Amino acid sequence: MLPYLIRRTRGLMTAAAIASILSGLFSVLLIAQINTALNSDAASRANAAWAFAGIALALMVCRMVSTALFERLGQRALAELRSFIAQCVAVTPFAQFERVGSARIQSALTEHSNNVAVLFVSLPVILTNTVIVVGCLGYLAMLSWQVFLFALGVIGLGAVGYHLVHLRAIHYLQSASSEQDRLFGHFRALTDGAKELRLHQSKSRVFMDQILGESVEGVRRLRTYGMSLFVISTSWGQFLMYAFIGLVLFVLVSDGPNQTQVMTGFALVFVFMVTPLEGLLINIPRINMARVAASRIDDITREMPQRQGLQEPRETPALQRLELRGVTHQYYHEQSDDFFELGPINLSFTPGEVVFLVGGNGSGKTTLAKVVVGLYPPDGGEVLLNGERVEADDWDAYRQLFSVVFSDFHLFERLLEAPRDDLDEEGNRLLAKLHLQHKVQVENGAFTTQALSQGQRKRLALVVAYLEDRPFLVFDEWAADQDPLFKEVFYTEVLPELKRMGKAVLVITHDDRYFHLADRLVRLESGKLLAPEQSAGAEVEVAHSVAT
Ligand SMILES: Nc1ncnc2c1ncn2[C@@H]1O[C@H](COP(=O)(O)OP(=O)(O)OP(=O)(O)O)[C@@H](O)[C@H]1O
């Protein structure tokens, strides 16, 4: 992920890095200039003053440029990351999307992306300070090569300790990131389950204390361990630095003719070096945080196809016949280590036909609908569109045949279907047909409100499906939330109208009062389609039990 970001921002990154390195160089020049001024006579001091002013000015400009550019880079990186992850999510096959899980995706889009962006705020500090420290060491080497070698030894010792502690710290930070992905799932439960939590005090307590609480605590504990280790390594680095300064000033510098001059030079360089060194020690952990976050994003995006952008829309052929031949789909349940198997399914649909799909809870109706509309390409068997097998590359185009109102449907703020001139007019006509004209309107391609009851929102979803004007419509228990009046409107007006319009319609339903209105009724039981005569028999049984 980091190499990708660096590649995408190469130009800006190079400019920002050059500005940072220059500001480091000017800082070192400045200190050399101060030291020269301290040891020069009054005559040469005038020239030194001009040089000093020039360097100070250049330093200010470089710092300003580098900080501004890196700030820009940070925002750009954040935007790039979010678009990249969102693009991956948008093109991921639905089954794969379900496996990755929305909590991990949310976490990647928010916290992990922010942590990666922080890297760009730390980079100028790290680059500038590295140049200052290296420059100061070079200056030290000019003042005394023995002190320079000694400094290298101390830095080596510090680096080994620092590195060992860092490895451990990163381990904790990675564990904290995994726990945080789970925490985002719990945050979702906190908002989605708001009603249930308020109704059950004990459930709420267990959730808050044991599930959410422990996860929050887990992230806190692991992050604290990780960051404490960073603090320990930073303090160790600072201690070594002061020990080094002490040893050089009080032990190594021998009595000599110009000892005061040498001591002043050392003291100046050391004092000047302390802040950049501290800056380095503080900012290096941020790089590690960013690396951990980037590797989490990598893990998530690797589970998804990394195609850039949605496919160009292909022409979808007119629907003449759709056939499922020996189609199967399997869900694996990790916790119980078992499978739910749908199929083999043999089923066909033609335009102008209304098919009812019925069956008990968990029999696989929604799963079959997802297979029919191409959200789950079949694990086995084949789907034939107008007699031609749908191949791997065809699924995107194939899915464009369908408008679906799932039982857990989502209504987008705007009506996102292809712009049509009469969108508002047609939308309002349909709203009136569904008796919603006094509650909501379509204005500028969007519903004026979505603050409606679940049944009313489902009617809006029906309006959207109508407006999409696709050849195949699927309704997953659409009528379940509707009052008797609208059930009646749905089964006796909407479905016949869709039939007259030549649409193929698949209706998942439990409303046995209306079963007789189907052109064909198919029944699922434990993932298998019952033979038509068994199905018909079952209907007689249902009718009988209703009658008695
Ligand atoms: N995303 C999923 N991951 C794993 N298993 C799933 C998933 N969705 C459904 N299942 C399993 O598949 C089986 C069929 O579920 P499905 O939702 O298709 O049934 P259904 O007939 O539509 O039920 P209902 O009438 O209750 O809506 C269930 O037993 C369930 O355990």
Image: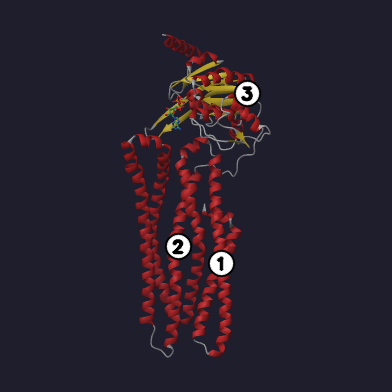
Task: Tell me whether circle 1 and circle 2 mark residues in contact (CB < 8 Å).
Answer: no
> Which residue sits furthest right?
421
Residue at horizontal 43 percent and vertical 64 percent from the top: 282
Q: Is residue 327 above or below residue 260?
A: above
Identify the amino acid type marked 2: Asn
Is disc 3's CB within 8 Å of ligand 1?
no
Q: Disc 3 on helix, strand or loop?
A: loop
Disc number for residue 283:
2
Q: Please give left or right for residue 481 compared with residue 226 in the image.
A: right
Of the four image quadrants, the one with ligand 1 is top left
Q: Nearer the viewer, residue 337 or 287?
A: 287
Residue at horizontal 61 percent and vertical 27 percent from the top: 430
Q: Is residue 255 above or below residue 120?
A: below
Q: Please give left or right for residue 259 compared with residue 445 in the image.
A: left
Q: Nearer the viewer, residue 58 or 340?
A: 58
Residue 62 lies in what quarter of the image? Answer: bottom right
Counting from the top left corner in percent of width and height, residue 151 is at: 42, 74
Q: Quarter of the image containing the C terminus?
A: top left
Q: Disc 1 on helix, strand or loop?
A: helix
Identify the amino acid type marked 3: Gly
Task: Tell me whether circle 3 and circle 2 mark residues in contact (CB < 8 Å).
Answer: no
Q: Residues within 10 Å of mark 2 (few under 14, many from 20)?
A: many
Counting from the top left corner in percent of width and height, residue 239 is at: 36, 70
Q: Is residue 479 above or below residue 226?
A: above
Between the residue at mark 3 and the residue at mark 1, the CA separation in whole angstroms equals: 66 Å
